[in-house]
Image (cartoon, rainbow, N blue to C red):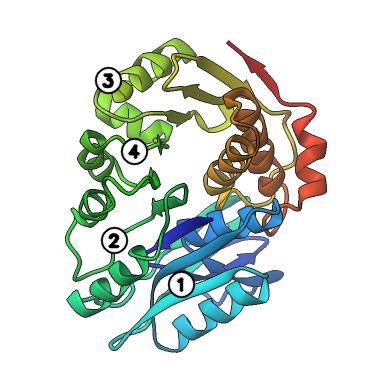
Amino acid sequence: MIYTVTLNPSLDYNVKMGSLKTGVVNRTEEEILLPGGKGINVSLELHNLGVATTALGIVAGFTGDEIVRLVKERGVRADFIHAGQGFSRINMKVHHGEDTGINGCGPKVGKEELAALYWRFDMLEEGDVLVLSGSVPSGLSESVYMDIVKYMEGRGVRIVVSTMKSQLAQVLPYHPFLIKPNRHEMEESMGAAIRDTGAVIEYAKKLREQGALNVLAVMADHGVVLVTQDGQELFGTAPHNRVVNMVGAGDALVAGFLAGYLGKGDYREALRLGIAAASASASETEFAKLERIREIAGTVEISG
């Protein structure tokens, strides 16, 4: 079973507009309301890929109730802690030639909610996967992901971490199975612009030396690098499709990678399926279905 954790989930209100102007009333042309948050996104795509998954996390208020309803409506098992104060955030994405986002802050989460979440972690078994991703809500320490990884040590659970650079660095000594830094995080860490695949591979190898078993480094529309625990250095690209919605593409990449690796134990095929899932989902309003992902997988080029 693959469990995902979303500590600060959201209702994603995505709208399309011909233009966006300040100081006047703007009207939408299209709109859709989706459950959001990086862990939830991973679970949604895993479900589409036919992989058993449970979405864990913390929600609050009427928006939290709607997040849980929408997740279950899409066929994903949901087991969320309900915080007693505040309400889960609403994130607005406006597509108007370019994308503009307004993200809410979310509820204040305390020790009681976190303790209840840890009780869920105690139910995980050897061979399970735990995906930790996304922002940390108010009230929780910035070291919360590191604390969870430490708590899960020695249980035979594979840990995947996809979050901000500072939180990624904290978990490296505990040897997570997979981390997924993006290009911005890599450039921030290196203090320089990344201009070629070679620089990304060198950065990923440094993260491996610091403790990560596998590093999935995303170069936006320039491809994906995978440096593996058995020494492989792979690079993959997908064909250019019409982009409809980039929100969650990186999460679809993680889902596809996990589905591919757990299915065959082959890093090359895992990278292929991950890139296909990301590319397919970027061309849809919601996460892509298995048939579309398989179609694109046949066109993904892997080298190395």
Q: Which residue is mark 1?
A: 23
Q: Are marks 4 and 2 in contact (CB under 8 Å)?
A: no
Residue type at mark 3 is Glu
| Closer-to-camera residue (32/301) | 301
**Badge number at residue 176:** 4
Callout 3: SS: helix
Q: Which residue is mark 3?
A: 209
Classify 10 Å Cα crowding around label 1: few (below 14), some (14-19), many (20 and above): few
Which residue does the image show at 55% across and 52% down from the upper left? 248
Classify 10 Å Cα crowding around label 2: few (below 14), some (14-19), many (20 and above): many
Residue type at mark 4 is Pro
Distance (Cα) linking label 3 and label 4: 12 Å
Q: Is residue 199 visible?
A: yes
Q: Position of residue 102 (x, y in %)?
A: 43, 64
Compared to 194, does 151 lie above or below? below
Q: Is residue 21 visible?
A: no
Compared to 7, does 265 lie above or below? above
